[in-house]
Image: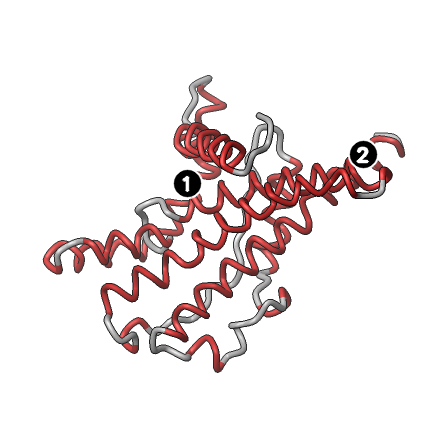
């Protein structure tokens, strides 16, 4: 690998740094803010209702994992921050507010995707030397935030979609569903790494997340592009 290749990798990576930091930081801050306003000040008292990324960064999930996925061909960009502590029992209306707190994170990612799309309209006023970098950064922000929103709404605990599903299920079904959370991270790691690896060895596409996230994110990105008046 020569200096030109290294320079290109750094340039492309730099267009992901800001989107990753903003997407993950605001996602977690939104959880904390929603919980605070709905009766639980745990995150607020721990200083997690803040836009300071240093309060939310997880060394592996925010730095190492996205870097590994960036370098792996065919991988989608993904990462996570330190989960915001929420005492759901302190919420005013447990089931309803649990769903609202959970939905606040993905909802914020969708808002960031829309804002990024709208900012693309301003590139004609940017200095020519920054247009390409800004375009790639905003484009990556749209894609990343859409993927994070969809991924986090998958109906698995401890993901936000799992919290929403638990709030919708009748108590008789919600209680056994909560018990699946202890296996949630193992399931997610298997979906992200293990199954695609096994599939690559067998010559079979076992990238289940790709089956779900690919078409869903393409559709949602195109919808945002249309709604914000961008050319497809």
Is the N terminus in the top left, top right, bottom left or bottom right quadrant?
Answer: top right
User: Is label 2 in contact with label 1 (beta carbons under 8 Å)?
Assistant: no
Q: Residue furthest top?
A: 203
In front of the other: 59 or 21: 21
Residue 14 x, y percent position in the rendering: 74, 45
Q: Which residue is mark 1?
A: 190
- Residue 25 visible within the image: yes
User: Which of marks 1 and 2 precedes in the sequence?
Assistant: 2
Q: Residue at x 30, y 64 (%)?
A: 98
Q: Residue at x 59, y 32 (%)?
A: 230
In the depicted structure, whether residue 158 falls above or below residue 213:
below
Pair 2/1: label in front? 2
Q: Give me the C-alpha separation between circle 2 and circle 1.
A: 31 Å
- Residue 197 visible within the image: no
Residue 113 x, y percent position in the rendering: 54, 45
Residue 30 x, y percent position in the rendering: 47, 63
Looking at the rendered structure, the secondary structure element under dot 2 is: helix
Residue 110 x, y percent position in the rendering: 48, 47
Q: Residue furthest left?
A: 172
Q: Residue at x 48, y 46 (%)?
A: 148
Q: Which residue is mark 2?
A: 8
Q: Residue at x 25, y 51 (%)?
A: 165
Q: How many marks?
A: 2
Looking at the rendered structure, the secondary structure element under dot 1 is: helix
Is the C terminus in the top left, top right, bottom left or bottom right quadrant?
Answer: top right
């Amino acid at each position: 690998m020569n200096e030109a290749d290294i320079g290109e990798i750094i340039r492309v990576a730099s267009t992901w740094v800001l989107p990753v930091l903003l997407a993950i930081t605001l996602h977690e801050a939104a959880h904390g803010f929603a919980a605070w306003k709905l009766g639980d000040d745990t995150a607020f008292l721990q200083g997690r209702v803040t836009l300071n990324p240093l309060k939310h960064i997880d060394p592996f999930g925010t730095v190492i994992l996205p870097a590994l996925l960036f370098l792996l061909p065919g991988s989608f960009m993904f990462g996570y921050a330190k989960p915001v502590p929420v005492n759901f029992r302190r919420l005013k209306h447990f089931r309803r507010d649990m769903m609202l707190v959970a939905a606040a994170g993905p909802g914020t990612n969708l808002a960031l995707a829309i804002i990024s799309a709208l900012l693309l309209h301003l590139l004609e006023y940017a200095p020519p030397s920054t247009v390409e970098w800004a375009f790639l950064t905003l484009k990556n922000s749209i894609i990343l935030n859409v993927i994070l929103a969809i991924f986090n709404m998958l109906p698995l605990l401890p993901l936000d979609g799992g919290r929403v599903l638990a709030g919708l299920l009748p108590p008789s079904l919600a209680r056994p569903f909560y018990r699946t959370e202890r296996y949630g991270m193992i399931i997610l790691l298997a979906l992200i790494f293990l199954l695609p690896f096994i599939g690559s060895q067998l010559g079979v596409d076992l990238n289940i997340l790709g089956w779900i996230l690919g078409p869903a994110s393409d559709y949602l990105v195109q919808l945002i592009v249309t709604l914000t008046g961008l050319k497809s």
